[in-house]
Amino acid sequence: MLKVPEFESIFGRPPRWIVAAPGRVNVIGEHTDYNDGFVLPMAIERYTVMAADISESSAPRILIHDSRARDTAQIDVSKPIAKADPRWSNYIRGVAAGFQSRGVKIPALEVALVSTVPLGGGLSSSAALEVCAATLLETVTGTKLDPIEKALLCQKAEHEFAGVPCGIMDQFVSVMGQKDHLLLLDCRSRQTELVPLNDPSVAWLIINTNVKHELSGGEYARRRAQCETAANILGVPALRDATADALERARGQMDLFVFRRARHVIGEIERTLQAAQGIRNSDWPAVGRHMYASHYSLRDDFEVSCKELDAVVEICQSIGLPGGVYGCRMTGAGFGGSCVALVEAGAVDAITKQIATAYKAATTADEAKNGIEPTIFSSRPAAGATVIKS
Ligand code: GLA
């Protein structure tokens, strides 16, 4: 059983509960979730873990120690929970407020928080934190939520307490991911299909560029608004309902940016369904082609890539099929963060070395004189949120 030594060393006794929730990587289906489209993410073997017990103090508060931030937060549970410092605690506050609004009484707790989900890497460290907090509160209060309701509660926390108007992908896969499966999620009906992926001949590489560009926050909201504008002009409830032909016919009625954003979304929804079919057929070269096409569309039409992400994709493309790379693309919201590549399992070590060397060389010219070290790891599709000790 997983141990969280931090809890014992801080609070001087073993924890009563331990829960965990994973980060995610999105294989394909980017910026489609808030357009009612399809996404195909998987949970990764990187987890946020909370170890907890009922508080020994009489104060009505949750005390959380975050070992990565080396910081402690206190949440008063005797009144309605609102936003407050430290900033990282707002994900947990938002989730706890969601339980309060369902009439659940939250007891005073002591919590040790540890995480292996990289921060700012586009791998949903915030969703992992929200889903981990929700899993802890379910376990502690005995209020088990339906998985969809749980994911939506966490998404609301992100909207209202972190101010990020995200879609539903990250929280859904952190709740519902299954080992050795991708999650094909219809973001309109919220129906899910687990697509098996346990072929030992292929592996997923996650390449963190270790850059995060400042403009990410406002640009995400801007892209969302542009997609809504396009749907309005096309007279459809969401871009999910639009076709490439209808968009082409309406080209003269919208500005070029809005047109290109919509072209990305419409194409990406189609590519996601085709990539899911490629995975069902174990047709790895086809999956790889869809991944590259997704990247170019995100780079040129949706304009959420950056030179570091493009460099990784170019390096992967130059290694190519002869070197064991099927495909590569940026993953997550963009403007930095990570790429995901589908590769031959036997070539993981060689490809990792090649990417690390070439990326460092490609990033030598500008701000980082000696080049940027990427962080590269492989992960099999992992399980969603779990109770480890109850
Ligand atoms: C972020 C959001 C998701 C999704 C992606 C882009 O990860 O949290 O809801 O919109 O960006 O696909």
Image: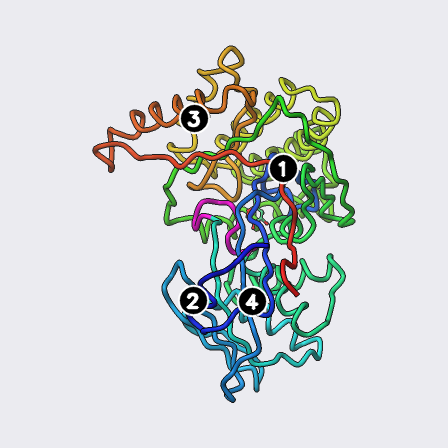
- In this view, the residue in front, 247 or 304, is 304
Mark 3 vs 1: CB contact within 8 A: no
| CA separation in Å, label 2 and label 1 | 29 Å
- In this view, the residue in front, 207 or 50, is 50
Q: Which residue is mark 3?
A: 352
Secondary structure at numbered mark 3: helix
- Residue 19 in the image: above or below residue 181: below
Residue at 66% in and 53% down: 175
Q: Which residue is mark 2?
A: 87
| CA separation in Å, label 4 and label 2 | 13 Å
**Does label 2 or label 1 sit earlier along the sequence?**
1
Figure coloring: rainbow
- Where's residue 29, x and y in %? 63, 37
Secondary structure at numbered mark 1: loop
**Does label 3 or label 2 sit earlier along the sequence?**
2
Secondary structure at numbered mark 4: helix
Range covered by the magenta-colored residues: 118-128
Left or right of 141, for residue 125: left
Residue 266 position by quadrant? top right
Picture disc at residue 254? none
- Residue 75 in the image: above or below residue 156: below
- Where's residue 384, x and y in %? 65, 50
Q: Which residue is mark 4?
A: 160
Q: Which residue is mark 1?
A: 29
Q: Is residue 122 magenta?
A: yes
Q: Nearer the viewer, mark 3 or mark 2?
A: 3
| CA separation in Å, label 3 and label 1 | 25 Å
